[in-house]
Image (spheres, rainbow, N blue to C red):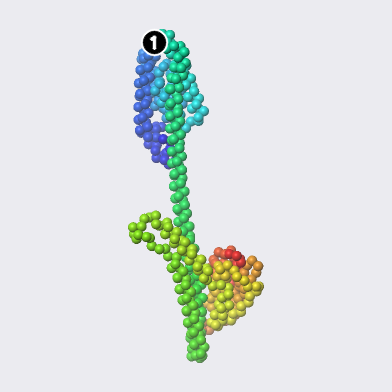
Amino acid sequence: MTTTGDSHSAAVNGPWWWERRRSAVLDVGLALASAAECGAEGITFAGDTGVPTGVGVAFGVLAGASLVLRRRWPIAVVLISIAITPAQMGIFLTVVGLYTLAASELPRRIIGSLAGMSLVGTLIVTLVRTRQDMESGELGFAEGFIPFIAITTSIGLTAPPILLGLYVGARRRLMESLRERADSLERELQLLAERAEERAEWARNEERTRIAREMHDVVAHRVSLMVVHAAALQAVARKDPEKAVKNAALVGDMGRQALTELREMLGVLRTGESRPAVGGRHGSESDVVPLAAVGFAAAAAASRAVDEDGPCLEEIEELVGQSRAAGMAVDLSVEGESRAYAADVEQTAYRVVQEALTNVHKHAAGAKTYVRLAHRGAEIAMQVENEPPPEAGPGDARLPSGGNGLVGMKERVTALGGVFVSGPTDAGGFRVSAVLPAAA
């Protein structure tokens, strides 16, 4: 069978041009049978032509043995069979040679031409031989039967091997095409599986990063305010008990809000857990794909739930009020007509302002801060700028910083197609600016 590519390399393990050892054994056996037939017919040929018997036998054996080359040079084998047709030898050689020729990958015009030559040669030889036999009295048919006998004999020796060879060749090519298609599909499935794994890993990393940003925004701001209030409480506890009580109440409120947000977030994440496989450990491997799909669908639903339940622009005023209660001088200004935006746009705008105020608490405690919102036609802009901080006093909260706040803000803004800029001002303060498209 014809093979290609890796399968061909794996299949070629026979001697010389044979792909398999059993193919070589088969061809050698057929060549021996053909040589024996042609050698026997060579005796008759020597008697008819007057050449020595040994020469006729040797000629027949060599001609019949050429069948061993049928896979390598099928055209040569067929031409030899046509050449020895006038000597009335090589019937087996002709039949096997025509079959091999038709089953090969040669063009159809070559196969048709050689088959026609063999048909014509057999027809002429049969016609002449039959007429000679009738004239010598060896056959008793009427002369009108001579063409019929010649045509029937030539077609009977030529058509069956050609048709069988064409069928076998077509079937062989079909099987090879199906095998190549199956190999191609297998490679495509393997590539799709690898891409799906990469995509799943990317999705897990993105979800992990998003959750980290959410946790940072929730914890950092609330806890920073709690630390600021605790520092103020420590500073005024003895001098102003009433203010200390007020700060303690604010610390409690901040803690409860932080716990509430964390509980909501963890509750949403729990809804994304995939259910266990039905049947315990006896579940089949095919359960893995549906469960994975359920897990991804639940994770996506959880992500949408977090976005929908997140903060909005209307809560920025309350956010600024919390910073004012912590002792920060904050000025809030809004330009343009306020309107509703997509949930992720409003949440991102809120988180940018929240993280910027948190950074002021951490790095510029007591500095005058300006928060500006601008509602434009196709976008919303926000800016948080603080003046240079005063000298750190005894009540400085000394808040730690992980350095992820600005990175998280930039990731949020750029993910929605916005622009984020941050950096120090000429006056010694710090400015955070972001522009978000109105439609995410």
> At which x and y percent is residue 351?
54, 72
Looking at the rendered image, the quarter that the N terminus falls into is top left
> At which x and y percent is residue 60?
39, 18
Residue 172 in view, yes or no: yes
Residue extending furthest toward the top = 136
In the displayed structure, 284 sits above or below 74; it is: below
Instruction: Please identify the quarter of the rendering in which residue 311 is found.
Output: bottom right
Instruction: Please identify the quarter of the rendering in which residue 431 is found.
Output: bottom right
Q: Nearer the viewer, residue 438 or 57?
A: 438
Q: Residue 341 vs residue 161: left or right?
A: right
In the displayed structure, 5 sits above or below 422; it is: above
Q: Residue at x 45, y 23 (%)?
A: 158
Q: Nearer the viewer, residue 364 or 113?
A: 113
Disc 1: CA contacts within 10 A as few (<14), some (14-19) or many (>=20): few
Instruction: Please identify the quarter of the rendering in which residue 29 is found.
Output: top left
> At which x and y percent is residue 430?
59, 74
Q: Residue at x 58, y 64 (%)?
A: 440
Q: Residue 319 vs residue 169: left or right?
A: right
Q: Amino acid at mark 1?
A: Glu
Q: Report helix, strand or loop for mark 1.
A: loop
Q: Residue at x 37, y 14 (%)?
A: 44
Residue behind mark 1:
138
In the displayed structure, 28 sits above or below 361; it is: above
Residue extending furthest toward the left = 282
Q: Residue 200 vs residue 410: left or right?
A: left
Q: Residue 193 vs residue 43: left or right?
A: right
User: In the rendered picture of this protein, how many numbered marks are placed on residues?
Assistant: 1
Q: Residue at x 35, y 17 (%)?
A: 40
> At which x and y percent is residue 77?
43, 24
In the displayed structure, 407 sits above or below 83; it is: below
Residue 207 in view, yes or no: no
